[in-house]
Amino acid sequence: QVQLVESGGGLVQPGRSLTLSCVASERTFLNYAMGWFRQVSGKEREFVAAIGWNGAPTYFADSVQGRFSISRDYQNSVYLEMSSLKAEDTAVYYCYADRRTAKTTTPDYWGQGTQVTVSS
């Protein structure tokens, strides 16, 4: 069974940085695009960032542009570096992998999510 496991979430103060990691339970995800969504309770899951199978192109939601960056190891891991965090960034963050499209609403695989809480 293919699984994605996120880590790195937690409580962080506004203005600080946090990096999330996601590792797939496969030897290689070389040809898979990967990315991140986030979801606040009671709201729809929203796109955050994505990266192509070879590290390009990258995509970012307007709400995180200039503050977040995405990277990968081209095999089975993707990272989300979050800076200048705001309270409105508080959400459960889900990573995904898709073999066809970097920016997609219906990925092939979802992680279980990791909670990020931005609060003083």
Image (tube, grey):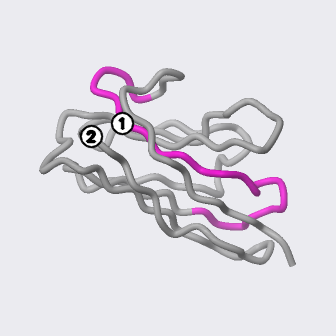
Image vertical order of residue 11 relative to residue 111, above or below: below
Image vertical order of residue 103 relative to residue 42, above or below: above
Q: Secondary structure at mark 1?
A: strand
Image vertical order of residue 28 relative to residue 90, above or below: above
Residue 33 position within the rendered picture, expressed as x and y whole percent measured from the top left: 33, 34
Mark drawn on residue 2: 2
Image vertical order of residue 85 relative to residue 60, above or below: below
Q: Nearer the viewer, residue 37 or 102?
A: 37
Residue drawn at 12 percent across, 50 percent down: 27
Residue 8 position within the rendered picture, expressed as x and y whole percent measured from the top left: 51, 69
Mark drawn on residue 37: none
Kind of residue indicated by mark 1: Ala
Q: Is residue 95 magenta?
A: yes
Residue extent of the magenta highlight: 82-102
| Quadrant the C terminus occupies | bottom right
Label 2 crowding class (10 Å Cα cut-off): few <14, some 14-19, many 20+? few
Query: Does the CB distance between marks 2 and 1 fall below 8 Å?
Result: yes
Seen in the image, is 86 located left or right of residue 74? right
